[in-house]
Image (cartoon, rainbow, N blue to C red):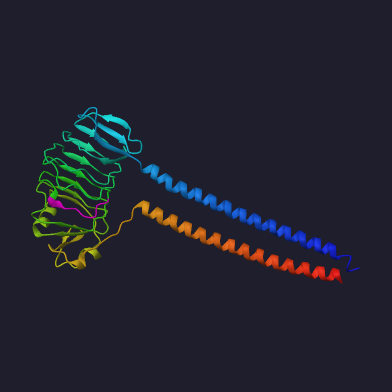
Amino acid sequence: MPVAHQPHRFEHILESKEQQNGRRHGQIRLLHAMFFLFILVISLVLIAPTQASLGFEFRPCSSNATHFCLVDLASRAITREIEPQSVLNLANLSIQAMTTRPSEAYSIDLLSNELVQLPSIDANASFHLVNLSHNKVAAVPTRWPSTLSTLDLSLNRLTSFDFSTMPPSLSNLSLRGNNLTEMELTKTTFPPSLIQLDISDNPQLVLRLDEDALARLVAANFSLVFALDSKKTTKGCTALARIGTQLVCLNLKPTSTTSIHQRSYSPGFLIAVLICTGIFLYGSTACFFTVRVWIASYEDDVRFRRGTICSSARLDD
C-alpha cells in the first residue's frame, strides 16, 4: 500500500516545485518592471529640469541693430523683437543671458528672470532705475552709469557686495534676501547720495562700519532696513555700536576669525544628490531581493532533488 501512493506524492512534489518556480519567476519579473519604471522616472526627473531651465538670450537683433531680440537658447530662434523704450519692461521673460544692456533706457525692469551674471555696463549709459530682483545673480558689474539712482538686487545669490563700485548718484539700494556674510561701509566707500538701504533677510551678515558710516546710518533722513544675529555680530569685534535695537561692528579690518562663510548649493546639485541617493537605495534593495530569491531557488532545488531521490529509492524497494 505505501508503494501505491508514491507516484501521487512524487507528482505533488513536482507540482509544488512548479508553483514555487512560478512565484519566483513572477518576483523576478516584478523586480525587472520596478527597475525599468524607476529608470523611467529618473529619466523624466533629469530631463524635466533641463527642459524647464532653457530660457532666452537678450541681444541686439541682427536685422535691426537698434532693436533687441529674445532668442530661444534651445532652438536659437528669435521669439520676440523689442523696440527701444525709455521704460523697458523685461520682467518674467525667462531671460538667462544678456549680451547687451540698453544704454538709452531710463529704467530697466528685469524682475523674475534667470540671470546669473550681467554684462559689462557702459559708464555712459543713461538709465536711472534697475530692477534685478528675483534672479540668480552672484556677482555684479564693477562699473555702473553715473546716472543710476535706484538698484534692486533683492532675492539673488550675492555673497559679498563692494560699495566702492557704486556710483555717487546711487540713492536707493536693496540687497534683501541674499547670502551676504560680511559687509563693510566706510567714509570712502559709502555712496554720498545713498539714503535708503535694505540688507534684511541675510541671516549670516556681519555689518562693519567706521564712525563716519555709522553717523550716516543713524541720521534722521536715512532709512536702514536690517536684522542681524547679535551672536555673529559681536564675535571678534573690537567695538560695538547700536542702531535702533541692532548691534553693529566698529571694526575696519576684519580678522580671519570673524569671517563667516555660508556654503550655498544650487537646486540642481540637491536634486542630483537626491537622485543618486534614490538610485543607491533602490539598487541595494533590488540586489537584496534578487539574492534572496536566488537563495530561495537554490534551497528549493536542493530540497526537491533530495525528495526525488528518496522517492525513487522507496519506489525501487
Q: Where residue 291 sits: x, y (%)?
A: 59, 64
> Which residue is at the far front?
316
Q: Quadrant of the C terminus?
A: bottom right
Q: Is residue 187 left or right of residue 285?
A: left
Residue 159: in magenta span: yes
The image quarter containing residue 254 is: bottom left
Q: Is residue 120 above or below residue 298?
A: above
Front position in the image: 257 or 58: 58
Residue in the picture at 26% in, 55% down: 179
Query: Residue 207: where, in percent of width, then height?
Result: 18, 59
Q: Give the residues drawn in magenta, as a range.
A: 157-164
Number of numbered discs visible in the structure rendering: 0
User: Taken as a whole, is the magenta stretch helix, strand or loop?
Assistant: loop
Figure check: 70 above or below 271: above
Q: Would residue 284 be seen by someone viewing this image from the given angle?
A: yes
Left or right: residue 302 versus residue 145 is right
Q: Is residue 91 visible?
A: no
Residue at image position (18%, 39%) is 129
